[in-house]
Amino acid sequence: MFRTFTVESLRVILLGTNDRSRMAGSCRDGWRGVPVFLRAFVIALLLIAVPASGLLAQDDAAGEKNSDSKPAAKNDGPAKPPTDPNVVIGEDGKPIENPFPRRFPAPELDGGHGWLNTSGEITLKDLRGKVVLIDFWTYCCINCMHVLPDLHYLEQKYPNELVVIGCHSAKFDNEKDTEAIRQAIVRYEIEHPVINDADMIVWRKFQASAWPTIVLLDPEGNFCGYVSGEGNRELLDGVIQKVIAWHKAKGTLDTTPVRFDLERDRVPSGPLKYPGKLLADEAGKRLFISDSNHNRIVVSSLDGKLLEVIGSGRIGSKDGSYAEAQFDHPQGMALAGNRLFVADTENHQLRVIDLAAKTVSTLAGTGEQARFRATGGPLRTTALNSPWDLTVVGDTLFVAMAGPHQIWSHKLGSDSIGVFSGSGREDILDGPHGMAALAQPSGIVSDGKSLFVADSEGSAVRQISIDPKGDVTTLVGSHDLPNGRSLFTFGDVDAVGNEARLQHPLGVLLDGQTLFVADAYNHKIKAVDLKTRQTTTLLGDGGMGKKIDPVELHEPAGMAIAGKRLFIADTNNHRIVEYSLESKAAREFTVEGLAAPQLDREAAPAVTLGSGQPTIETEGQVLAAGEEVTVEVALQIPDGYKLNDLAPVRARFSVEGEQSVVDAESLSGSHKAAVTENVARFPLKLTGEAGRASVKLALIYSYCRGGTGGLCKIHTARWTLPITTAADGKTMLKLKTDMPK
């Protein structure tokens, strides 16, 4: 997390803009990596100039560009062609200034270890005509997770003008693996292409220095600027609007729709999808499973019989019955009597399940993410920030609040929630509650005197006194290293105390004097002796895998115990592993009768006629009544491109007014065409009645550089077909698309 006027001013120098960017929620100090000569230049400039205020421009309250003191010019007739290359005339005849006059050509995107969420490499040439955001991220980082909803919002708002490219520049060794990134893309439901920048080559080309950092490129491939941290949706939205307006007026904006082949389409859905946390109720003979990416809680008997499914499976925050309730990627749980508390992580809420009444309600949170260093307040009016795990000690619910790097607490029955431990600084620093620093706490358990916390970004296990006047200490892993180096000290070393090394642990579980740790990025379960602080490997060989004998794991995130049976949420393998602490035997724990949620599947992308789109007019056609006419369409493809073999060619028919000649079957839904050598064929079924109809046909196809290039463009061709049916009519109708721009 950082906020420095020097870095902000550096951005102003590069970009020539006049509004302050909000910099918050970054995982790494942004001043690091800035060349020394630029630091000196910035500081010198600050001594002689009024402090400039930010990276990207925003509209003022009136929605117009601020100027020093000049009034707006009167509109006395048609605008004269501008002589300034940074001024163009908009559709309304008014001049539009280039929001980034000091832009410069961006470096290429090559140097990675491959592309994901797309069928091939993407170059800056492919992106010409599009506004581009490059998101430098690493999938362990909570701030990077918080940026994803903002990027999704912008992608939805500007579907034909904006392309987002994720550049995954890993922090942890495990995150450099392409398969690990693929799993994160599917788990986080990312819908844009991602580069595996394992060697940080692209990172260095763009001089990124913090996770997350978002870089803006204009449609001509120029670097415009960047912003680090989270909470910049409105800022980016305003800037994108300005860039779109400028390049639309200039004629350099390409609004051709694009298509990517997503990783999620290659992953079959099973009974569980990225299960996050587990909770065993030995007395009640129940196992609770947070089926995180199915957005529900599964309740099973300890012998594998399905007892309840809590939640519809749809993303949302609706309260109500088990069937009605909605969650958004729930994680940790805690049981108190007949109440099951749930960390509803991506809703930024705490939910409570009444196991007797079979209802779900909201305990705390507004549904909006709290900003940095909120302190707490009334339950339903206090915003939370990514609650990840829970534990109940006596009459207090403790919350591992990953977003602000703190532990929060709520006294059951009260109306308040607030910070219990942690300053909010992201680091591994021991000391009193208010001064100690944590790093994305993701697992929590207690022995009644202390809280044991998996501090994931610091690759450490912390021991936190429940006494409000107590201290925070580090049980496993490094701590109190200068300049935040504890955040980058990780590995896979079984040793004593601070000499041991973990890699992004996500879960902890207490069994007597043994603390089990889900060492996620080492794909292991480790055991810590609380008396000696000795850490040893219990399960896993350090590599991702899915064997049962010997046990292999893939980023395990949670555990539960009932007697001598250890249950493990083997998250990326979409399964629960049961391990006997006595016999040392393992098996996959399955829940009989459990299936994926049966949600209404989204239909194939609609082929619509759309207003304002060009329609190819055709002469009247006489077709054979009562026959199935073959419509044959020659697909025009621009030079240098080929038809995308991975995307079906689809067509949709509709008619104007009442008619009786086209069979209703042809008018329902879209139809997949058979394609041979860029010619698409599909049937048009006619009734046996003679008559006339005005048939509208829309056809959509995708083409890519090389046929399976990373960025594929979509073209829709539309025709109006006046047809007459007769007994001696044709059974073949030949058409040709227009040429995509």
Image (spheres, grey):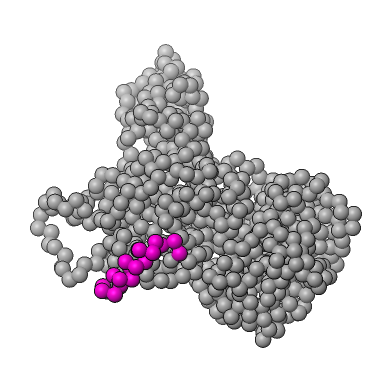
Image: magenta residue range: 32-49
Horizontal placement of 681 versus 404: left or right? left
Left or right: residue 560 versus residue 166 is right
Q: Position of residue 74 (x, y in %)?
A: 12, 62
- Tell which residue pokes out farthest to the front in this image: 37
Residue reaching furthest to the top = 728
Can residue 336 be seen at all in this image of the molecule?
A: yes
Q: Classify residue 298 by image quadrant.
A: bottom right
Residue plotted at (86% across, 56% down): 580
| Foreground pick, 109 / 590 | 109
In this rendering, does residue 306 appear at all?
no
- Split into 4 quadrants, where in the image is the C terminus? top left
Measured as percent of width and height from the top left, residue 314 is found at: 60, 55
Q: Is residue 35 magenta?
A: yes
Seen as rendered, the residue at the extreme right is 583
Q: Say whether residue 88 is left or right of residue 421.
A: left
In front of the other: 511 or 263: 511
Q: Quadrant of residue 660?
A: top left
Position of residue 568 measured from the top left corner of the image (x, y, whole percent): 76, 56
